[in-house]
Each structure stands twice: as structure tokens, then as C-alpha cells.
Amino acid sequence: MPTLTLNIGHQLFRLKGAIMAITAADILVETLCDWGVEVIFGLPGDGINGIMESLRKCKKRIKFVQVRHEESAAFMACGYAKYTGKLGVCLATSGPGGIHLLNGLYDAKFDGQPVLAITGHHYHDLIDTHAQQDIPLDRVFMDVAVYNTRIMGPEHVENVIHLACRTAIARRGVAHINFPVDTQSESVKSGFRSKRNVKGMDTNVFASRAGLPTDQDLIRAAEVLNSGKQIAILAGRGALHASDELIALAEKLQAPIIKALLGKACVPDDSPYTTGTIGLLGTKPSQEAIENCDTLLMVGTSFPYIEFLPKPGKARGVQIDIDPARIGLRYPIEVGLAGDTKRTLQKLLPLLRKNKESDFLEEAQKGMESWWELMEERGTRQDMPMKPQVVAWELGKRLQENAIVSCDSGTIATWFARQMKVKAGQMYSLSGTLATMANGLPYTIAAQIAHPERQCIAFVGDGGFSMLMSEFVTAVKYKLPIKVVIIKNNTLGQIKWEQMVFLGNPEYGCELEPIDFVGIAEACGGTGFTIEDPAECGDILDEALATPGPVIVEAVVDPFEPPMPATIEASQAAKFAKSLARGQPRRMKIATTILEDKVRELI
């Protein structure tokens, strides 16, 4: 029999006595390769069998990472985008598989990350006929996606994939492609190309913008900032790549750098110019600087909690954001600078005069000295049961210079925000605007796949981890040396304290049935450790971090330790007291814990 040699996706396929046709799914995978896609997170299903076959043929060029739940695939794609700056890609089957992606895709949408979601669909001629799993995912995804379409035939694929990838990257959002299952395996030769669909017109070229505001706006912004005496800088995720410029800006303006949580790593915490994070999870010096500033410069942030920003009219405002639509979104802005933060600051800095008034910055620096003393006191307590701050403090001291730390939502984010000192070169993230639970473990898996040489840590709560804890076996399967540190308090802590402090209600429905997380780790083929005694916390973390392969550290902590805000409002104290009076379970233990904490601070 003659041997046929065929070039598909830059790979040679040799078959005896048969012709291997190039399919629509082959074109999909080849086009993704052209865009530099190296990994796809997903779960096989009969609605994407044609795509899976094409991925099998191209497995030397694109790594397929099998997850245990499609929600994790979307989280991993989002985390991959966050930690690489590249396009994240996830894949799910038709119907329920595609629906499972939505939470992770909204995380990408809300945090402005480029993600491509590919979903299967029913046979093209049975769509909208009440067939099994016949869900129009292209309609379901209309809100979450900046680009969203259904493949109509083999000759449609290349056009659509180029546009989907380009749009996701350009608009920093989610693109979605819905692909009928029979079309996936259809031969390209059998497709019909319309006369306007000219072959060779597609391109994988992406054009970057200079990302600069107008000279006139730069001059106006400089005038506002040069007039300020007590200037505060609020920096977010859009400033993560502009650390040097932020520090130069702070030095020139004599302004403290206050960090939104997604911007935690924009400036290391050993810089004399930062007062750390803001909001419920923030520091007291940050809040005082915001309340007392006469000028606010917002750099790459859409920090959503406007109650922690100056009252309108209290401070003049300048905002730098790459998206002009977000200028003035959170605070009344006098001058908006639409552009990339790094390049914009490089243009703005020469226009600024050195602020001769340094008292405002010096006051913030004194406040931070006291704040870090307080954080160390909370992080070194030897009380039993162990305080969660101890685990965060001890872990933070042991992180490598290039560590990547992913956190979940809940009280865990408070300890993440306050107790872990950021070092230059480290990366930190969590679900910012969506503030979903369960993202911490998938983010960490994606980080380790993207950066196999770096230390990748998940710092999570027991509530969030248990939602998608099956993904720990994914880390075992792919031999990823991730370390998962679980703060185990057997309660949905953030919800409990919100019920009490914000509403004045006794907690209800928040207690969690305990899980043996060490047993889970071992059942999955990993290693587990338990920490209960704060005196042993550091030593056990040392051992866990040095252990090869995936590791879970179960840290059993005081469930009554509250995530106290930096400053307590009278209304919050009143509602907290009301919740105790209305029958809060174990109210005496809660009240005693809070009283002990405040007494220690006074001493």
C-alpha cells in the first residue's frame, strides 16, 4: 500500500492506504498554536470529541491539562492569564460542561484578564430541537464575553479564532467559541467558502497601542498634582508592572502609596513609601492617609469600595487607567489620563515638581512602623487555639523571592492582605472584583504550570478549598509541587462576621462539618501536615515547603478570631453588640476573644 504523508499543524502524519482529512477542529488547534497558546485547561466530553482528537494529534505543541471540574478550568485559565500576561484557554463540553465554566469566566471578566473559552454543542441540525444537552451556550455567554459566536462550518473556523484571540487580548476580557460536535470532525474540503471569505486574509498579528494620554491632559494632571500638599496614591492591578515609576512618583510627590488588594505586589512592603492595603482588609495608616489627603492620584485601579475613598469634594482627583470608560468610575476626577500606567507615569514624572511638604508622608511612615509592630505581635502569639495570623506571618517569612501566592475569598483574604509582607519579584493574586470562593487552588495549579521553576503557594480557607478540593489530585497527576496552606476554622468566617457586624444578626448557617484535609492529601497521593500549636508552626511549615510534590498543610485555628477592620465604626460596634444580645451562639467566647485582642493592643 502507498504511504501518504500529510502536514497538519506543522506535524507530519503518515498513513498506509488511507487519506487523513484535515478537520475543522484541526484548524482550530493550528490557529491556537499560531497565537502562541501552549496550554489548555479542560475536561473531555462527547460534545468536544473532535477537538480532543485534534489536541491529541498536537500534544507536543499544546499541553492539555485535565481538570476534575470545568469551573476549575476557567479559574486556571484566568490565573494563567494573570501570572503570565498571556491568553488563557479553557475547554468544556456541551450543555452542563459549558455552564460550569461561567463562574471562572466572570472572574476573568471582572479582573480584566484575556481568556478564550471553547465549548461544544449538539449536532448542528439538532440545535434548538429539545435534544439532549441542547443548551445555546453562545446565548448563555452573551453577558460574560466581549466576543461570542458559534462556528457555522469548517471554513468559518480560522476567521473566528483569529478574531476571538485578538479581541480577548485587546479588550482584556473573555472570548467564547461554541463549536457543534459534528462540525468539529467535518473535513475542510467538504466545507463551502463564500466568495467574500477570501483564503489567506486571516492573520495572527496583534498590534499593541502606545497607550499614552494627550500632552494637554498630562499638563493638566501635573498642575493638579503640583498644587497638592497632602497627596495620596492609590495603586491597583494596572500598576503591577510600574513599580519603579510608582516609587519615583511617591518620592517626588512625598506621597504614600496605598494598595488595592489586586495591586498588593505593585510595590514591596519594605518600601518606605507604601502604607499597604486599603478597605476592610487594609491598614490603619492607609485609611488615615485617604481620609486626610487633599489630592488623590488613582493609578490602574477600579477599587470598588467607594466608602473607603475620600468624600466627594474632599480631595482633588487625578486618575490613570488604560480604559477611558473607567475614568471617574469610583471618584469624581478632575483630570483623567487614559493610557498604560507605566508609560503614562514616565511621561508625567518630568512635569512634576518635588513636593516640599513631607509631613504627610512622614506621618504615614510613623503609622506604618506601629502597624507592622502590631502585625508582628498578632503573628507571634502563642495562644491556643492558634491564631490564623500566626500561620500567615510564619508563611510570609518563608516565601522565596520569586514566590507566587494565590488566595481565596473570605477571612483568609484579611490575613493574606495584612500579615504577608510582599518582597520584590513575588506575585500575589486572588479573585478581586468578583470575590468568588474556590479560586485559590486552581490559580496555584495554573501558576505552577506556567512557572515550573517558581514556588507556588495556595493560601486558602477550609470553606473555599473544599468547594474544588478534588483538583488537588490534578496537581498529583501532573506532579506539580504546589503547597496548599489551609486555614481550618470550620466556619464560613467572613459570612459569620458580616451577619453579626453589618446586620446585627446572630450567625446562621455558617458552621462547617470538619474535614480531615491531611487524609484528603494522602488519599490523592500527596503529602499532608497538621499544625495546631503555634510554637511548632514555623518548623512544620519548613518541613512542608521542603517536601517534594504536592502538599497540604492543615492549620487548625481559633474560629472566634475576628477579621477586625483597621478602624471600627460606631454603627459596626452597635450592630455587633446587638447580634450578641439577640442570641449569637457562643457569644461569651466571641466577646472574650475580641476583648483580649483589644487589651493586648493597648498593652
Image (cartoon, grey):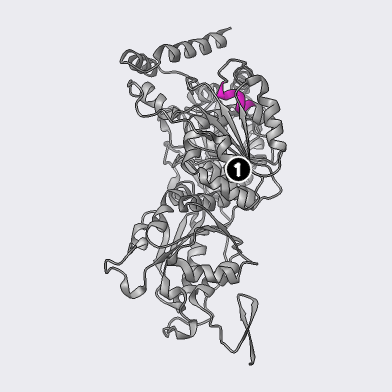
- Reply yes or no: does residue 321 show up in magenta: no
- Residue 205 visible to the viewer: no
Amino acid carrying label 1: it is Leu
Q: Which residue is at the far bottom?
A: 1
- Residue 509 visible to the viewer: yes
Number of numbered discs overlaid on the protein picture: 1
Name the residue rendered at 64%, 45% in the picture.
346
Name the residue rendered at 41%, 28% in the picture.
511
Q: Quadrant of residue 487?
A: top right
* Element under disc 1: loop
Q: Is residue 195 above or below residue 311?
A: below
Q: Is residue 534 above or below residue 79?
A: above
Instruction: Say which residue label 1 marks.
Output: 240
* Picture quarter with the N terminus: bottom right
Where's residue 53, x and y in %?
53, 71
Magenta extent: 387-393
Viewer-closest of 82 and 47: 47
- Reply yes or no: does residue 388 show up in magenta: yes
Viewer-closest of 89 and 84: 89
Q: Residues within 10 Å of mark 1 (few under 14, many from 20)?
A: many
* Picture quarter with the C terminus: top right
Image side of residue 251 versus residue 105, left or right:
right
Where's residue 417, x and y in %?
56, 31
Q: Which residue is at the far left?
A: 129
Where's residue 407, x and y in %?
55, 38
Q: Quadrant of residue 133?
A: bottom left
Where's residue 214, x and y in %?
53, 51
Name the residue rendered at 54%, 74% in the picture.
26
Q: What main secondary structure does the magenta stretch of the protein show? A: helix
Viewer-closest of 591 and 355: 591
Q: Is residue 569 above or below residue 330?
A: above
